[in-house]
Each structure stands twice: as structure tokens, then as C-alpha cells.
Amino acid sequence: MNASELEVAVKAALARVAPEADLDALGPEVPLRDELDLDSMDFLAFVAELHTRTGVAVPEADYGKLGTLAAAVAYLGARAR
Amino acid sequence: MERPRVIAKSGRAPSYEALCRDFSWAQARAWLDGLPGGRGLNIAHEAVTRHARSGLGRQIAIRWLGKRGERRELDYAALERASNRFANALAAAGVGPGERVFSLLGRIPELYVAALGTLKNRSVLAPLFSAFGPEPIAARLRIGDARLLVTTEAAYRKKIAPIAAGFPRLQVMLVGEDERLTSVPGTLDWARAMRAAADELEIGPTSPEDMALLHFTSGTTGKPKGAVHVHEAVVMHHATGRLALDLRPGDVFWCTADPGWVTGTSYGIVSPLTVGATLLVDEADFDAERWLRILEEERVDVWYTAPTAVRMMMRGGTELVRARRYPALRFISSVGEPLNPEAVFWGLDAFDLPIHDNWWQTETGGIMVANFAGMEIRPGSMGKVLPGVEAAIVRGGREGEPFELVREPGVEGELALRPGWPSMFRGYLGEEERYRKCFVEGWYLTGDLAKRDADGYLWFVGRADDVIKSAGHLIGPFEVESALIEHPAVAEAGVIGRPDPVAMEVVKAFVALKPGFEPSDALAQELVGHARKRLGAAIAPKEIAFLPGLPRTRSGKIMRRLLKARELGLPEGDTSTLEGGT
């Protein structure tokens, strides 16, 4: 998957968890949890969605590397096939 | 290898028997100073002023870690001056003793200053969880008859502006981002108000029975309840910090609960400061790696967290934990929902320390049941009752049912407590009848089902009502159902807690649609979004299921228990009161 496909996948995963969010307006560097009001359980669901959509299983220790849209795309880009 | 059933805890802590022998409420009161000149008892004096004036002024009271790596420290002298300023700023704004000051803030330094300053002004602190949406906020402001709200400019625009018209008497004070001044018409600015206020203050006479804190909790039906606590509660906050959390002066103490919930106020603000500890505050939300780094680098001595957080950490395995060293860490405790035995054993594997679970609720104001430091832990048990408190397992007593004490060990019933400890709630604000219904023959009924073994250990069984326990928070199904039925597609909604291995329960809504609407994944998503906008992430359902109609009793109440039984695949029990029968 290339970067723009990954961005689509990340936004789709976010839309599952926070369907009310205006993801078109989401800046690449905005902290996701604050901006989209994600609690810890939402974040776990987001990670599970990412796994389904990209095949990348994110270990707990790396959750902090998914803090923004840009960070998540970069993280997945280094790992997705 | 077989696990031991009982974990013996070593260390210097006194045995449970010694605690019970030596403890009295009079002695706990004597651990505090009281206001000078016999002017009463004030929480903020015990938490800050007495330390600032007695040589502890240079000790760090609050060490704050920001989301973006910032770090700020306030010593007791600085916290004293800042909270004095806020108290004076409140008075200047015309907010008087007994009036309610609400906060809707993340874990930023201003929250702690506002909390303590409010208590110094003898106003009543009502902290709200910052992840609440506009509807839960409006309901609580109304019940609490809010006089002033402290919030951020961002939260104001998103959550308060849409509801502000309903609160003509409410004054709003805005905290600007990165200490910038705010300029929203009709509001006060934190920085300006603080600058204009003096940093000296003599706390006015405060009766131990004066209202100090208003914490909201949820019932099965109706609106949230505002549990009233008084300044005398500080006796409990201090005593339980020492006895149940093993807190000592100079400790670095980290309570991970948000002050928007009772744990985050009683133990995330008041208790550690009264002891003279350093309160560690992390602004960020849960992240396993970050939390472990904090435990190590900040040399945390005592850590009070939640079973949900422990279980989230367990998902990362013990390796993540064991990659670091925690030489300072002495005592780990948890509260919010029962800590499963696996989590206790995991604590031993990961930290070489057991996790001491305890139990209490908004109404009790402080820890009631605990696995004390000097006591054997029975994994899965909430521990034994606090010295000075009497607990019982009871049956019946509600709505005219016969009431009896269950004396036989191991038999399930409702956990009841004999009132008399200082932080017992004094009422639900404006709801005398609801308050009265909590008591039967001198016992306070907690709403939690439990059993007690032959050695006095208490074991949580479940809730006696339909309230949902999720990630340590109580969620009232009615509040969620009310928001859902505002959606044009929804005819009726029934909300339950679906069991979850991490959060204990997650909020699940069953929805029946109005004619002309068809169940679909897109509609389910729309309803989740609808609920999140109104309620916020902490309360909104995580799952929606469609049903053709909801089961109701003949009197028209939605049978949530039946929905839950079906969800769990359990026998549905007696359905004879069900509408039409099934």
C-alpha cells in the first residue's frame, strides 16, 4: 500500500470508531485522541481496525507512534506490504 | 506451577488486626490541624496551607507532565499562593461560600489550582470529566445550580457555547492555551483574573459540615445524582491515604484517575497533599510505554490505578514492563471494578509487586474496603473493610421487601455499610427522596452485590441494578437511552453493559426503529456518531444492535435485564411481568 492508500485506510479506521468526525478537515499533525475524542477503548478499536485494513498488527509498545494521521501513515508505511 | 491462593505481603506495614486495634476516628481527626483559632476544618487548609506555613513550603506539591513533554513543578508555597489567588478571584467575581464552581478541564495545572482555591473560598467544587459531551454537561450544571464554570477556550466553543443560553446566571472563566489570554465576549479570562487577585488569604470560618464537593454519579433511572460531600471528608481522605494506600510524607504518588471522577479528586488531589506527598499529574491519556517510563523516571513510590489500565498493560506482556527498573515503587493499588486474580499475579510477574485492589464509590467519598499493605491478598477479593467502618451483606429492604442481614459466610447479597465515617455523602443535591431510599434500618445500601468469606474478605459479585461499570466509570443507561431516542430514526432504546475482558463492561445499545427506517450498518454508525456528539466518548455506546421492539414490563419499563440475559445467552428467568408474555 502506498501513502495515499494508507491515509485512506487510517481515515476509514477512524470513521469506524468516531463516525461523527469530519475527517476531511483533519490536519496531518493534529493529535488524534484529543481532536476526535477517542478514549482508551476507542483507541484499541482503532488499532484493531488498522490491522484488518492494512494487515499490520501494532504492538502495545508502539501505540504512541500512532498519535497523528501523518505519524500513523508513516508507521504503517514502514510495515505494510 | 500451581499459583498460591494467598499472597503474603512482606514489609513494615502494620497487620490488619493492628490497624483495627489502634484506629479511631478521633485519632484520624487528630492527624489534621484544623483552621487556626478554632475556626473549623477546611480541606484546602489541610492539603496546602498548613504545609506551606510549616516548613514544607519548598517541597514539590505537584509535578505536572504535559502531553508534549512539558514539565512544571509547583512547591507547596507556590500552590498556596496560586490557590489563594484563585479564591480571591472567585470572591471578586461575586462567587460566595456554598455556591457551586464547576470545572471542565483536562489534567492541567489550572485544574488543581482551581480545585483548591474553590475550597479556600468555601465554595463547592464540582469537577466534570472533560470527555463529557454537551448533554451530560448541561444536565450536571443544572442539577448543581452552577454559579461559575472554569474551562478552556476550546472546550467552551465545542461544548458550552451550544448550551450556554440555558444558564443565564452562569459565569464562565476561560483558561487560554499556552497561557495566552482569551477574549470570548461575556466570559472571564483566567490569566487576567489571577493577575488582578492578591496571593494572600486567610480562609474564613469553615464548619466541618459545610458542603465542599459535589460529585455526580448515575442511577438506573432518571437524571444523574449529585452526591454532596462536606469539609469533614478530609479526615477520611487523609486517613485512608495512610492506611489503605500506604502513603507517607515525601512519597511521589501517582493516581491515574481523572479529577472528573471521585477517585481523581479524593486521591488525585486531596489525600496525597494532606499527607505531604508529591502529587504526580500526567496530562496525557493511557499509553503503556509512556506510563512505564513515568513510573521509572519519576521514581513513583505509590501508584493508584484502575483494573482496566492494568489489563491494557497486560496486553503488552511482562517484557515491556521488565525492560525498565522501578526501585522506588513500593505499593500498587487499583480501584474501579474488580481486579481479576490473573492481574494480581501479573503484577507479581511484571513489577515483583502484587496489585492491591480496593473498593468504594462516589457516595462513600473514600476507600471503604481494601487489601491493606500489611495483609495477605486474596486475588480477586476487594479486601477487608476499613477500620472504623462496619460492613454487612444484606438481603431485601427495597420497595418494602423484608430486610435481613446475611450472617453465613460465602452467601451473596447486597453490600451495606453503617454510616458514620467522615466522608459519607450527606445527600443527593435537591433529591431528598432518592437519598432516603438508600437507607434501610440504619444501613446504607451500596447497590453492589458481594459476598464475605469466613475470614472477612469481601468479593464483588455484580451490580444490584442496571448501572453499567465501564473502565472504572459508572454509566447510567437512562442518560444514554435519552440521547439515542432524540435521533429521528429511533423509536426506543435499551442500554446495557456488555461484558468485556478489558473494560469489564462496554456500553451496548439495543434500538428499535421508527416505521420507514431499516436496520443497516450505516445507520448503526450514524447512531454511534449521534450519541458521541451529544454524550462524549466516555458515555456513548460502543455498539448498536437493532431489534424489532424492546421487551417491556407491564408498567412500561424497558427490561434491560432481559436484554442482558439474551446478550449473554443466559436463561431469561421469570418473564411473567413482561408485556404480552413471550
Image (cartoon, helix red, strand yellow):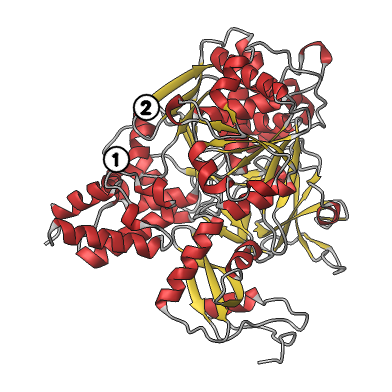
Precedes in sequence: disc 2 or disc 1: 2
Number of the label disc, if any, that sits on residue B275: none
The image shows residue B400 at horizontal and vertical percentages of 87, 68
Judging from the image, mark 1 belongs to the subunit labelled B
- Assign a secondary structure to mark 2: loop
Location of mark 1 (residue): B322
Provide the chain ID for the residue under circle 2: B
**Residue, x 49% and y 72% (percent of image)?**
B544
Q: Quadrant of the C terminus of chain B?
A: bottom right
Residue B64 location (% of width, % of height): 45, 27
Horizontal side of B159 relative to B49 (left or right) equals left
Front residue of B391 and B490? B490
**Residue B235, image quadrant:** top right
Say above or below: B13 vs B220.
above
Looking at the picture, which amino acid does disc 1 mark?
Arg
Which mark identifies residue B70?
Answer: 2
Residue type at numbered disc 2: Glu
Residue sitting nearer the eye, B486 or B274: B486
